[in-house]
Image (cartoon, coloured by chain):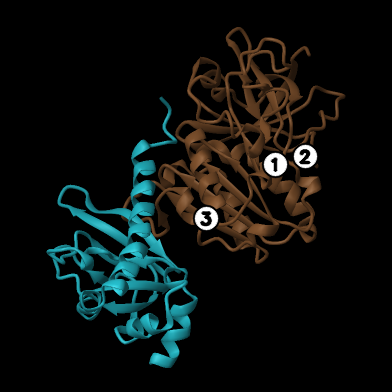
Amino acid sequence: MMSTLEPILAKHPFFKGLEEHYLRLIVGCASNVRFDIGQFLFREGEEANNFYVIRRGRVALEVFSSERGPITIQTVGEGEILGWSWLYQPYRWHFDARALELTQAISLDATCLRNKCEEDHDFGYEFMKRFSDIIIQRLQATRLQLLDLYSTR
Amino acid sequence: MLPQPYVVQRVRRETPDTYTLECVPPTGSDGIPFAPGQFNMVYAFGIGEVPISISGDPAEPERLIHTVRAVGQVSKSICKLKYGDELWVRGPFGSHWPVETIAGKDVVIVAGGIGLAPLRSAIYSLMHHREQYGHIVLLYGARTPHDLIYRGELEQWRGRLDNSVEITVDSAEPEWRGNVGVVTTLIARATFEPSRAIALVCGPEIMIRFTVLELQKQGMAVEDIYVSLERNMKCAIGFCGHCQFGPAFICKDGPVLRYDRILPFIGRREV
């Protein structure tokens, strides 16, 4: 497993520039997973035990409304990172994540990684820098979505 | 510069407020040649004139195609035209997408909403000479799936193995299985070589600014990014000054402009 995932993770932009021994730490917490169409990767309120590097497919981040049914907030696709609730207490998912297509991903164990971040703060800082960048990107994109740019005034 | 009457041959409803009109020129005329990205001043008789990009194929100037969104009195009037009605037109005006000078490059086309309309003529030109270009990527964003225009063409372009077409919407009903999110989120995943790519961008100005930021983040230079701007245009020939944008007139120096030339002015409230 390690020899298969290490080169895949090493090439991923999220892990670019990460020192080799850190990458090996991460690979130790990684596993291949797959989700069929309609299958949930996680549900709102569940413990956030991992995050995902999507290799193939598309996942909808949804919130369920009793009046409107499931509402897709955004989709996450090939090459993107899914999930940051594992980093922050109470370590619970805020939304549902459901596979819109057959989805293959690398799952990274949250408890394993949080422990490693606590043991090695330099490693933890590298992770926080990378996740901060993703969170900022998603926030900016969400702000643009809220602007409703295409409507007529 | 006098308007000429074209005859409406076909009207297609793209979305609840957007229509594509296909027109033929006056009898005995072959139609006026145009370059992709140019616009006409389209006149609703007795009401007024608006600038509308030409959305047809530059290789077929005898078919004049305009896609119009009904937002004001003039455009609403134009959208009510039917087969056999007259559409008064003067033009074409303005600068064009540089399709003839970008051979060998990857082409990244980013469109938002009705911004796909000014880009459609460029896409036709690129497809006619497909072998001259590298990767061609079309990234298109709209408000909802119901607001997507040119659905038939999108499927055709998507069906070609030598193109990439990615579509996203800002919000969607549960039946939608595609991307949800703003169009800028598609750029990082797109397949193109930033050092040898040209970008053609059209849509709301805020979308254009953030698209350019994302393209730069991927390694593109502003000199390689072309945008089509929309401002209030009246005379269309650089006399009235309504469309002045810094030192440029959108009607004459634009609407297609290289981004490095407008960077000092775009987003500035005083301009």
Give the structural element (helix, strand or loop) at label 1: helix
Amino acid beneath label 2: Pro
Give the structural element (helix, strand or loop) at label 3: loop
Nearer to us in this view, A128 or B191: A128
Query: Does the residue at mark 2 contact the one at mark 1 (Cβ under 8 Å)?
Result: yes
| Mark 2 or mark 1: whose residue is earlier in sequence | 2
Give the left or right position of residue B66, taking residue B90 as reference: left
Q: Is residue B83 visible?
A: yes
Amino acid beneath label 1: Ser
> Chain letter for brown?
B
Q: Residue at x 70, y 35 (%)?
A: B37
Find disc 3 in the rendering and name its residue: B187
Q: State the CA–CA distance, disc 3 to disc 2.
A: 28 Å
- Give the quarter of the image for residue A38: bottom left
Residue A81 on image: x %, y %? 37, 67
Find disc 1 in the rendering and name its residue: B121
Q: Residue at x 54, y 48 (%)?
A: B151
**Which quarter of the figure is the N terminus of chain A placed in?**
bottom left
Apparent colour of chain A: cyan
Find disc 2 in the rendering and name its residue: B58
Q: Residues within 10 Å of mark 1 (few under 14, many from 20)?
A: many
